[in-house]
Image (cartoon, rainbow, N blue to C red):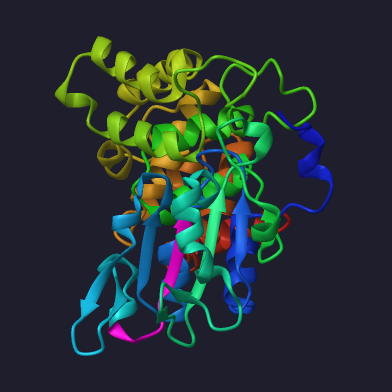
Amino acid sequence: MSNQNEITFGKTVSIAEAEALITSVPTNRFHLRGEPGIGKSSMLERIGKKLGLPVAYIDVPNMDLGDIAMPVVDHNSRTTKYYPNSRFQLHTGQPVVIMLDEFSKGSKPVKDMLHPLLEVVNPRLGDVPVPTGSVIFSTGNLSSDGVGDNLAAHTKARLTTVTVRKPGSDEWIDWALQKGTIAEEIIAWVKRYPQVLASYLDGGAGDNPYIFNPRTQQDAYVCPRTLELASNIVRARSGFSSDALIAALTGVIGEAGARDMQAFIAYADQLPTKESIKANPKTAPLPTMPGACAVTVFSLISAAEKSNFEEFMEYVERMEMEWQAVFAVNIAKLAGKQSIAFASPRFAKWLAVNQDVL
């Protein structure tokens, strides 16, 4: 296992910064390396959307040579040529964004066959040229993660290798609110316990029971990918028992995370409903424990609409200033909610009194 200091040799970048590099320098072959489950693979759709190009997801470790291209006999010329697999979308003749996911974990024959895609000049797959204007990048993990990543020296010489850092809790919360499908209990839990998104490469993170750590035997751990899986479970919890809920959460984020999250779920099930808050913003019960406050605030942010915002704001104003600020700051920067908030007379009045918050 290589030294952990490899990640601090140079600057690390966020997911958003990595996307900006790829879209701004499309001729380079970027190789993005980072811890498991931090969102590297999720870039593909966003990059394709930004560039207005179709995308091709290539799951390199699960490919065999026949999954890439096949030799076909041309009887007229008495030669063979390669027919690429349709997943690469090269047969369309149009530019495409190709992501070679977990490229550094692929078998040597597969990597060798994909290698011509990494060329900056005349990239190709077999004898099929890549359409001009295409974007190709790859992903992998850090060698210190100990999950089987390896690249030959001549491959590294063709790549622009960038280390992508794990998103912090505030970055992940911004993403989760923008996505709009992550359970508010999950968002509140991350807000209350930001250490669940710490990195094993951070100083003093060795005893963190929640996170991925290559020095520890783990069946599950907390990361952006598993938080989204946990959200799916939490949102469906009315369909199964509390024991099944904890068992499922343990299987996706680990025992430490599951036990702590259970408390947040208990808070959520005992709090006033969003409907009761809208109906009685002046009298609906207020949470007192920090965890319950977090669940309430993020629940109201997720549910905020023009028809209920005034009542939600009136209710939030009864909470401690810390939670008023959390509500205001997050809703003010959330696409789709900004216009609702800034059109509210009550929100405008609150800002006038507390203008130093935003």
* Magenta-colored stretch includes residue 87: no
Camera-side residue of 74 and 189: 74
Residue 254 in percent (x, y) is at: 45, 18
Camera-side residue of 142 and 128: 128
Q: Residue at x 55, y 24 (%)?
A: 290
In the image, taking residue 115 as reference, residue 358 lies left or right, namely right
Whether 58 is drawn above or below 283: the answer is: below
Residue at the farthest top position: 243
Quadrant the C terminus occupies: bottom right
Residue 202 in percent (x, y) is at: 75, 32
Whether 36 is drawn above or below 108: the answer is: above
How many numbered callouts? 0
Residue 211 in percent (x, y) is at: 58, 25
Residue 249 in percent (x, y) is at: 36, 21
Q: Residue at x 71, y 63 (%)?
A: 157
Res 198 seen here: no
Camera-side residue of 166 and 85: 85
Q: Which residues are magenta?
A: 92-101
Quadrant the N terminus occupies: top right
Whether 209 is drawn above or below 357: the answer is: above
